[in-house]
Image: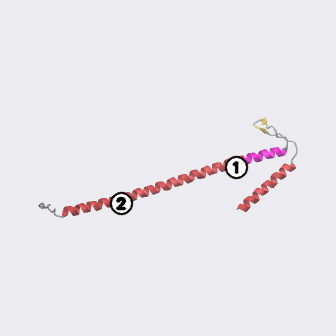
Amino acid sequence: MIFLGLLVALAAGAVGVAVVLDNPDAAQLTVFGDEVPGVTSQWHVFMAGAVVAIVFMAGMMVASLGFRRTMNMRRELRDLRDEHEESLQTLEMERRRLQQALAQARRGMDDQAPVPAQRVAPN
């Protein structure tokens, strides 16, 4: 994939150089009805388009990274909520088990006859 990406980038660079070298004729570029200063030939127009394309791609990359980060954070938050819910369920089950054990222990103590305390005479 890296090789393919470099090959495509090299091809795009070659096309850009060919366009710049083969278009020295005069040109005019207007944006929103105003003429852009400094653009006097066709290759200037091409380079302006290339700059706009680069800025567009940079903006799309930033948006993509932000979207990916948001999705990762949502996924992590969902996982943490699930883990928290499982932890609460486990703790609730443990609490019930301990309550039952305590109730059984109390019943066992109630079943035993209380032994009266005996006094020990001082020596």
Q: Nearer the viewer, residue 27 or 1?
A: 1
As shown in the figure, which amino acid type bears the numbered disc 2?
Glu
Magenta extent: 42-54
How crowded pointer 2 is (Cα within 10 Å; few <14, some 14-19, many 20+) is rated as few
Q: Quadrant of residue 114?
A: bottom left
Q: Is residue 103 above or below residue 24?
A: below
Q: Circle 2 is placed at which residue position?
A: 94
Main SS of the magenta segment? Answer: helix
Q: Is residue 48 left or right of residue 104?
A: right
Residue type at mark 1: give it.
Met
Which residue is the site of mark 1?
57
Which residue is painted at 32% across and 61% down in the image? 97
Q: Which residue is located at x 75 percent, y 58 percent?
A: 8
Which quadrant: the C terminus? bottom left
- Quarter of the picture holding the N terminus: bottom right
Image quadrant assignment for residue 15: bottom right
Task: Tell me residue 84's x, y (percent).
Answer: 44, 55
Of the two numbered discs 2 and 1 on the same chain, state the one appearing first in sequence. 1
SS at mark 2?
helix
Name the residue: 23% across, 60% down: 106
The colour mode here is secondary structure
Magenta segment includes 65: no
Q: Which mark is residue 92?
A: none
